[in-house]
Amino acid sequence: MANRRDWRIDSRVNRFASDAFWTSRLPDFSKITTPLLSAANWGGQGLHLRGNVEGFQSARSKQKWLSFHCLEHWTEFYTRAGIALQKRFFGHFLKDEDNGWDAEPRVQMVVRHPKKCFTPRGAADWPLAGTRWTKFYFDHATSSLRTEPCDGGAAISFEALADGVTFITPPLPDEIHIIGPSTAKLFVSSSTEDADLFLILRLFSPDFTEVTFPGSNDPHTPLAHGWLRASHRKLDYDRTPPHRPYHTHDEEQKLVPGDVYELDVEIWPTCIVAPASYRLGLSIRGRDYVYPGDLRAVQGKIGQPATGVGPFKHEDSSDRTAAIYGGVTTLHATAQRRPYLLLPVVPGVSL
């Protein structure tokens, strides 16, 4: 009993990744050399999904697999199909069973579609070979996403603890397959010394009904989430490729109110086939996503009201004081500052 700790207090006190509290708990992926199977859930936004991918990519194992499933964990991974997958993996490596496991693609995924059954797809690498990293530029004048750069436009401001603004593409002319991580390049100022940004990648049907999926945390999970506290914008350039910003989280860089700062926001991996005539959207908010549909009869899996993010909410007033995080956030776009959303568009397969 004497060794028990309050995780919430420890997390508040130890605020940087460089603190001994965190460095003592971070894994050394270079020590992982055993065969591994990492089970990820597309709907695990805010939970295990990011760690599944990071662990798979960073482990030194020569024999490693990454398997993406959908819906709740127990629907696809704790029932017959998921158990059979695990038994084949363990049977091959622990019992020397000749069950064909070594011929399995290193990346296995269930591909989501809003109008068809989910289908399997395999790949040799992550991110997928042939990924076309596609920029969608923010058009402030029309609150839209465009594939061509915009000349600029008026700045857009919103209350820093409010719903923010949503940028939406025109109807997609063709079906596109989006599989992988995304990122957003933003230019932001604040009326205070800091700001929290919540980015939500979304899909809308032709009548603007949002497409969500049951996930591990919530029955109405959007395509993907991204979060960044502006004072933690510092990048680790040695680790950061164009499609995946890594932040050092080793110091706090407060904002000068009114000054414009360049922010790179990581958006967690996702998988969707977006049909022609549908629209993609990105919401830039000052608080957690809330599913816009009817939530009156929906309860969470562990008792909390399910609003789209499950239990992973950012509502701690001691962490998000109104004096610092309750100001006005402004998004900027000019000919010299062109914000964009970078999406992983991959070659399609028959569905």
Image: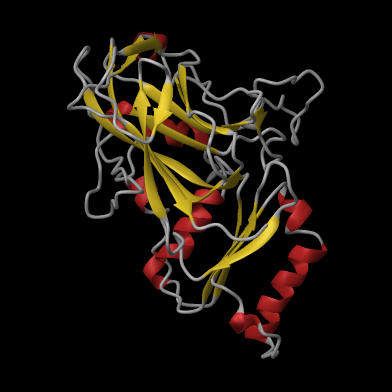
Q: Residue at x 66, y 77 (%)?
A: 89
Residue 329 in the figure: left or right of residue 336: right
Which quarter of the rendered picture does the N terminus lie within?
Answer: top right
Residue at image location 48% in from the left, 64% down from the top: 56
Residue at the farthest front position:
173
Q: Position of residue 78 (x, y in %)?
A: 76, 59
Seen in the picture, residue 28 relative to 270 is either above or below; the reply is below
Q: Is residue 117 above or below residue 336?
A: below
| Residue nearest the viewer, comparing 186 with 82 | 186
306 over 155 or under it: above or below: below
Q: Position of residue 213 (x, y in %)?
A: 69, 39
- Position of the C terminus by quadrant: bottom right
**Residue 206, visible in the rendered structure:** yes
Q: Position of residue 314 (x, y in %)?
A: 52, 25
Q: How many marks?
A: 0
For residue 120, side relative to residue 296 (left or right): left
Nearest to the observer: residue 217 or residue 277: 277
**Res 305 → quadrant:** top right
Image quadrant assignment for residue 299: top right
Pinpoint residue 303: horizontal percent, then vertical percent: 76, 30
User: In the depicted view, which residue is nearer to us: 5 or 65?
Assistant: 65
Using residue 205 as the reference point, say whether residue 191 is left or right of it. left
User: In the image shown, does 301 or 69 lie closer to the viewer?
Assistant: 69
Residue shown at the point (56%, 25%) measured from the top left = 289
